[in-house]
Image (cartoon, rainbow, N blue to C red):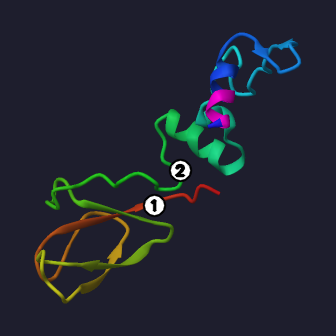
Amino acid sequence: MAGRLLLRACTATTLHLRSGVAVRPLPRAMSTVRGVPTDEEQATGLERRTLQALKHGKDPYSILKPKTYAGTKEDPHIVPGIGNKRLVGCLCEEDNTAIVWFWLHEGGAQRCPSCGSHYQLVHHELPH
């Protein structure tokens, strides 16, 4: 009850105390001229670098959902890699429990030995 009365009194321009003295409430820290700071203004370190990269349309740490591909020879699934070959697992059917593993080498698109879906290894630089 007393808290609500204090809040009502603070919303007015002046606060009247029992002693009869009129006191203005102190301004809140977040109610500055610019308002509440945004996430970009408060971010520091790695979070700040990530937000700046996303603002420029880059995805430095693979945060965003990967683009979907058709898996055909013209539009193969892109597999990023830091070497010249990579082990790839293919779930040939949606509800399949067995994974078909095969080596994917840098160069043109290669087919999955079981379902025929195409994959292509693309060299990817690490962001750090």
Is label 2 or label 1 in front?
2
The label on residue 25 is none
Total marks shown come to 2
Name the disc covering residue 60, or none. 2
Residue flagged by tag 1: what amino acid is it?
His
Which quadrant would residue 105 be assigned to in this image? bottom left
Residue 58: image location, x then y, percent: 49, 42
Front residue of this view, candidates 45 and 6: 6
Residue sitting nearer the eye, 5 or 60: 5
Residue found 70% across the figure and 21% down from its top = 10
Report x, y in % for residue 116: 11, 73
- The residue range painted magenta reads 2-6
Residue 102 position (above or below residue 127): below
**Which amino acid does the dot numbered 2 rest on?**
Pro
Q: Residue at x 67, y 50 (%)?
A: 46
Q: Residue 123 carries which label?
A: 1
